Image (cartoon, rainbow, N blue to C red):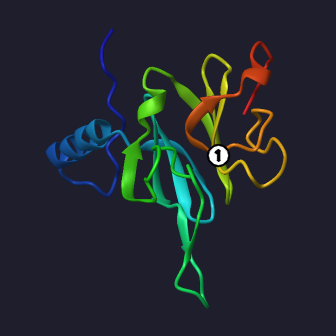
Amino acid sequence: RGFELPAQPEDESCAVRWLCSYALLREYNPPVRLAAGDMHSVFIDNEGRLSSCGTAAEEEDQEEDEEQFPGLLGHGEGVLQLKTPTRLPSLRGEHAIGVAASRYFSLALTADGAVWSWGCGWQGSGALGHGDQQHQRQPKKIEALAGQRVIA
């Protein structure tokens, strides 16, 4: 089975430049799905890998203190800012197909139907779906949805 190249755009006069650009885009692996919360973004690349970037600390206008949102980026304890999309280490081997982000937490759906959540658990009882109000600093599978059909 051969490799089919996309059509060269009409405004591109150089076929070599177009093929090089196309190859770079394929190599770069741009995101195919994304979600944005107030202060962070979550991306799925075309291989189903999750990355995030943004900040998990909000500057207070009238105080010098920052309000922190534990686990918002999904990279573990102490990670409060990522300036570029960085792959989430805890989901290696999982193939994400859907993602959602809010001000306080994020959700991911994997190809096997599992739902994962991470972020702040204190914004209401069971906000992350684990039956408690614990912060999840890395993605954690929502066991209550195991065996259920979940769609994005």
Total marks shown come to 1
* Residue positioned 17% across, 50% down in the render: 14
Q: In which image quadrant can residue 104 be found?
A: bottom right
Task: Determine whether 2 is above or below 75 in the image.
Answer: above
Residue sitting at 43 percent across and 53 percent down? 79
Q: Give the camera-side residue of 94 and 64.
A: 64
Q: What residue did someone put label 1 on?
A: 135
Say which of 34 and 7 sits in front.
34
Point 53% across, 61% down: residue: 56
Neighbourhood count class around disc 1 (C-alpha, 10 Å): few under 14, some 14–19, many 20 upward: many
Q: Is residue 37 visible?
A: yes
Between residues 67 and 27, which one lies in front from this camera angle? 67
Q: Where is residue 41 in the image (x, y as percent from the top left)?
A: 53, 55
Residue at the far left in the pictured view: 16
Rendered location of residue 128, percent (x, y)? 73, 41
Asked whether residue 101 is in view, the answer is: no
| Residue in the foreground of this view, choosing between 54 and 8 | 54
Residue 18 falls left or right of residue 74: left
Q: Is mark 1 on a helix, strand or loop?
A: loop
Q: Which residue lies furthest to the bottom in this view?
A: 62
Q: Where is residue 136 in the image (x, y as percent from the top left)?
A: 61, 41
Q: Is residue 16 shown left or right of residue 106?
A: left
Q: Say what amino acid the circle numbered 1 marks.
A: His
Locate residue 120 relative to residue 46 in the image: left or right: right
Looking at the picture, does residue 103 appear above or below residue 87? Answer: below
Residue at the location (47% across, 49% down)?
Answer: 52
Task: Give the x, y percent position of residue 124.
Answer: 83, 51
- Report the quarter where the N terminus lies: top left
